[in-house]
Each structure stands twice: as C-alpha cells, then as structure tokens.
Image (spheres, rainbow, N blue to C red):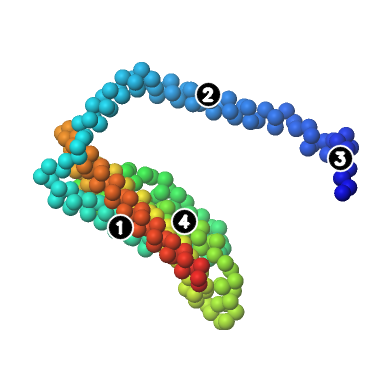
Amino acid sequence: MSQLPKPDREHLRAKYPEMFEKPAAARLATPAMIVAALAIFIFGLVDLDFSPTKLVSGMSQLGWITLMMIPPDPGSSLLAYLSALGETLSIALLGTTIAAVVALPFSLLAARNIIPSGWLRFPVRRAFDSIRGVDTLIWALVWINVVGLGPFAGVLAIAVSDFGAFGKLFSEAIEAADRKQVEGIRASGGNALHEIRFGLMPQVLPVIAGQVLYFIESNTRSATIIGIVGAGGIGLQLAEQIRVLEWQKVSFLILMILVAVAAIDWISSKLRFAIIGQRAVA
C-alpha cells in the first residue's frame, strides 16, 4: 500500500502565510479576554463585599435552620396549604394560556415570511423585547398596585411577561416553517389566509404546544415567587411561615412545591413526546 507524500511545509507556508502566522492581535485576543474576565470577577467579589469568613460563620446558622425544618409538619393548615397550591397551579396555567392565545396572532406580525416589510415588523419585535425585558416579579409588583393583592395580579403578571417571550418564540417558529406547503396552497389557488391556516399552522402548532407546556412548568415556580410579594398562592403562605419562623411548616411547603413541579414536569414531558411523535408520524 503506497504512502501519501509528506506535505511540504515550507511550500505551504509560503503559499498560505495567513494560516501559519497569526497576527499579534489574534494571538493575544484569547489571553486578554481571560485576563479581563478574571479582573471583572475579582472586582465583583470585592465590590459586593464577598467574605469567605461570613460564609463559613453562616454555615452554622444554616445547619440550625435545617435541623429546625425536620420533620416537615403542616400542623393544622394542610387544607389551607393544598388550597394555596391549587391556586398557584391555577395562576400558572391561566396566565400561560392567556399569554399564548394573545401572543399567537401578534407573532404573525413579527414573522419575516408573513410581514416582509421591516418597518412593520420592527415595532412589534421591539415591543416583545421590551415586555420580556421586565421580570415577572416586577410585573407582579406593578399589577398588585393596579388591581390589588391576590391571584388576579399574579395571572396578569405571568400573562404579560410570557406574552413577550411567546411572541418571540412563536415568530421564530413561524419563520422556520417549510415554505413548500405554503407554495402548494398558493399554487392551488389559496389566498394569504389559506396559506397561514393550512400551510403554516399545521407545522408550527406542535412546536408552539411544546413551548407552552414547558412554560406552564416554569411558571409554576414563577407563581410561587410572585406569591411572596402578595400575588396569592402558596408563595404567600411560604413567606408568612418564614416570617414567623415556623421552619417545619416551611419545609413542608417546600416539599409540596417540589412534588408539584416534579409532577408537572413529568406530565409535560409525556405530552411533549406525544406531540413530537404525532408530528413525526404526520
């Protein structure tokens, strides 16, 4: 078996000097970025008053709190906690559903293959960016001052926050759809609405459904957090028990949240795989 001739390095170096001799800026770019990142990290630790001594001394306090949490005990408030957990799940489900339903038509306006004009897409996309740039907790504080304390404010906070995220994700899914089905609808005499209804939607709806299921799971945790600031649900119960130092009840509430999130994660995973399987068969 014949061997390939060895490459002539000098010839290759003379022919392609840029491949063998990188400029100084290119060679120093990576070390400079590493040094800059390290400097920023150290500055952050100093500026934020990071203290290993405080961390070590606080571990004993953390251990004491952990011991006080054992065993988890709801006391006489089990029914109230179950009701609060159901309220949290309702906030997550209702807020996510409202956001998805409202965001879908607006996402069509942000998709390049639906609205070719950048002048029309630009304000819609920037609106999505602006809305999702504000955290759900901030929206909860806003809506609490608008409609008052309670789960209604939590639903509105999640709906508004997810509207911006869904608008971006849905528009990207629409832009990634295969154009062949749309062209087939057009060739058979369909109008623009037919192209969207029968050409685009059957392709993107499974993707959208998977995204909505994931957000329902994520928003269960978000609904717990916004409940702490007064938007109802189990988060409000958790904040109250932490305030009065009822650590056994706190641990029980945490376990309830973990079990609920795990169950929703399992259910949504099964549904997502079912949707993906139906899409593959189709």
Task: Kindly report which numbered mark, 1 or 4, lies closer to the viewer in this rendering.
Answer: 1
Q: Residue furthest front?
A: 1
Mark sitting earlier along the chain (3/1): 3
Task: Residue type at mark 3: give it.
Answer: Pro
Measuring 42% from the left and 45% from the top, which residue is drawn there?
133
Residue lying farthest to the left in this orientation: 76
Dot 2 or dot 3: first in sequence order is: 3
Q: CA distance from mark 1 to mark 4?
A: 18 Å
Point out residue 101 in the picture as x, y percentages from the top left corner: 37, 63
> How dense is the environment of label 4, judged by Cα within 10 Å: few (below 14), some, or many (20 and up)?
some
Disc 3 or 4, which lies upstream in sequence? 3
- Spatial CA distance of label 3 from label 1 is 64 Å
Q: Which mark is residue 7?
A: 3
**Mark 3 touches mark 1? (CB < 8 Å):** no
Do residues under tags 4 and 2 come within 8 Å of each other at their CB atoms? Answer: no
Where is mark 1, residue-wise? 93
Q: What residue appears at the point 65 percent right and 30 percent down from the top-left corner?
A: 29
Give the mark nearest the N terminus, 1 or 2.
Answer: 2
Q: Residues within 10 Å of mark 3 (few under 14, many from 20)?
A: few
Structural distance between the alpha carbons of marks 1 and 2: 44 Å
**Which comes sooner in the sequence, label 4 or label 2?**
2
Where's residue 222, x and y in %? 32, 47
In the foreground, 178 or 132:
178
Residue type for callout 4:
Leu
Q: Which one is earlier in the sequence, the residue at label 1 or at label 4?
A: 1
Q: Is residue 258 left or right of residue 239?
A: right
Q: Are discs 2 and 3 less than 8 Å apart at CB?
A: no
Residue 271 vertical placement versus 17 (above, below): below
Residue at which label 2 appears: 39
Q: Secondary structure at mark 1?
A: helix
Looking at numbered disc 1 in the image, what kind of residue is underneath it? Leu
